[in-house]
Amino acid sequence: MDFLVFQYPMITVQACLDGILLGVLFALIAYGMALQWGVMNIINIAQGDLVILGGYIAYFMYLYGIHPAWGVIVAPVIMYFVGIAIYKLVINKVVDRDLFISILATFGISILFMQLMNFAFGADVVLANSGYGTTMLFDSNVVLPNSKIFSAFISILFAVCLVIYMKKSKLGRAIRATAQNARAAKILGVDTEKVYAATFGINAALCGVAGALISITFTIHPYMGLPYTIRSFMIVIVAGLGNLPGVAMSGMGLGVFEEFADYILGTEFRIGSVFLLLVLILVYRRFKLSRKREYLK
Amino acid sequence: MNKNNLILYISILIFGLAAPYVFPAFKVQLSILCILIVLAITWNIQGGEMGYNTFGNILFYGLGMYLCASVQVGMFFPLAEWTESGGEKTFVHTPTQFFQGMAVGLVVAAVVPTIVAGLIGYSILGLRGHYFAICTLGLGVAAGEISGGIEIIGAGQGFTTPPFPNVGSLEARGEFFYFLSFLVLILTFLAVKAIYSTRFKLILNAIRDNEDKAEAMGIETMKYKIIGWMISAFFCGLAGGIMGGLVGYIDSTDVAFDGREMGVFMVLMAILGGKGTLWGPVIGATVFHIFKEGFWTFFLGWQYVALGVLIVVIVIYFPEGIMGWLREKYPERFGEVVDEADRKAQVEIK
């Protein structure tokens, strides 16, 4: 136990700011998760692996001399088609089936992606250096890398664009209609199959953006996907489906929690604490709901 | 029918007892097969009979593995120094110490996970459907990450289990572990078979089919769910303890709490064989293990890619498993009465 956090307030400020900037990224991934969960009723365990794949796209641009920040534009385009391909090959066969089938199928996709990335890109921890420098606050007691600020800004930009797109465009309306009632939407002439494919593609594209930003700000590794899946799942169940401010808030909350867990418990327990928090949240939710007896269908 | 069953059981028993002498080169593989079958059978209690698809039984398996090895070392030597030396031969178990330690370790490895399952059961088993699946997935990964940070059991560098003492022939180690795992397999199978012939199985099936209705009928579903999980945990822990000794080296995320490999294998084997049947997991595990060992070498490094594809293919195209397929083909064999007129009508409709 390290009580430096309480004795030296600047560390607290640093952890909070780091956590919030990180949490915005989590919220972006969770938004994609909420989208496909709400529309297709699928929990995608491969979500985190899509994120990592997006990160590798930015990393490769960096290797070939292009500034990795352009990955924010290239990665979602590539990932959109990857998402469509996954949908056509696997997901469209499990959409109407039992939820566990989809969990297991996407778990298989996750293992597949993990290993393919391990073969293609190697098992090293990599990072695309953006060369953005740092910002000092409070007499240089708090150090913020500019790349983190950049990534938070880009995530918010993408989220806002997507929200507007979902509200205004024809496809956005079709997606929201399908989420409300797939059968009714079908009767009224919405091609739900196309909507599902587009939803999965948009989700993959969001993962691509988040991954490119993560490769700039943090590090990526082929096996780091599952924690991102769990984080986004956690954010979605805390916020609830279709609650955008909630997703943003709980994403930031999770980021701050992680930074503090990192400082207090030590880095080796960081991922473990995320998974434990998931279990605790689910158990808390179960007791809260069982008091209301709402979990009965 | 009964006589046929008896012949089947006796022939399997004879095959099991003779196997290490008939295939002396495959002793380790056969022991692993026994462990895999045990894991598939225990997963089937949750996933098949109770309808609670858990990824978390790996928790009990890993717990049993660490506990058995820790007890085996800790009974005679200081545990911290043992793990620090990283398997150097500073301390050597005498044969008596080894077997005593193993016996006590296996008892602890079976009992403690059972207690853990009982303690966390009330909170975890109240979750339903996919929340339960994800929660248990998180439980398994969390256990792996946390045990990877604890110094006394080796942290990230792993834990070397006591080496097998030098008694008699060189073959003794393989035979010992084979017969131990075969014994556990028989125990598990007979215990589960006995359980499945009681009212308990019907209650589990009622929970699977409609839990709320079962509760409304006056069944204390939570009690039975926890008991079912404790039974699973008991045999999972036992299997883990043996597997730790067999592998000889425990790593937190790659051997003990190996959600990516063992944790998925047990689900896959049970589904491949057929969920919710007694023999399904046994058949599924055997087929899976033969496939894995037979073809893994051809993929050479691409095994996990093949595993990912295999999961997707089995789940999408073969969710009923081998037993489900047989049942559809020969319903009479499963004691289902098929009305001839009904079948003719179905054929005509087709």
Image: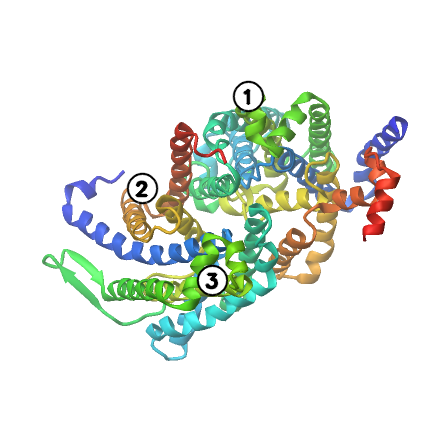
Determine whether, in the image, residue A224 is placed left or right of residue B56. Answer: left
Q: Nearer the viewer, residue A131 or A53?
A: A53
Q: Distance between the residues labelled 1 and 3?
A: 42 Å
Q: Which chain carries label 3?
A: A
Instruction: Note whether residue B88 is visible.
Output: no
Q: Where is residue A212 in the image (x, y as percent from the top left)?
A: 38, 67
Q: Is residue A158 left or right of residue B186?
A: left
Q: Mark 2 lies on which chain?
A: A
Q: Looking at the image, can residue A261 be seen?
A: yes
The crowd level at tag 2 (other Cα within 10 Å; few <14, some 14-19, many 20+) is: few
Q: In the displayed image of the protein, which residue is found farthest to the left? A: A139
Q: In the displayed image of the protein, which residue is found farthest to the top?
A: B218
The amino acid beneath tag 2 is Leu
Check disc 3 and give the amino acid type.
Thr
Q: Is residue B175 above or below residue A113?
A: above
Mark 1, Cα crowd under 10 Å, few <14 / some 14-19 / many 20+, is few
How many tags in the picture?
3
Q: Residue A199 carries which label?
A: 3
Residues at marks 2 and 1 on the same chain: no
Q: Front-most of B256 and A18?
A: A18
Which of pointers 2 and 3 indicates the residue nearer the eye?
Answer: 3
Residue drawn at (20%, 65%) of the image? A134
Mark number displayed over residue A265: 2
| Residue A289, image x, y percentages | 40, 33
Mark 2 in CB contact with mark 1 (< 8 angstroms): no
Residue that label 1 marks: B220
Foreground residue among A150 and B348 = B348
Tell me the quadrant of the picture where the N terminus of chain A can be found: top left
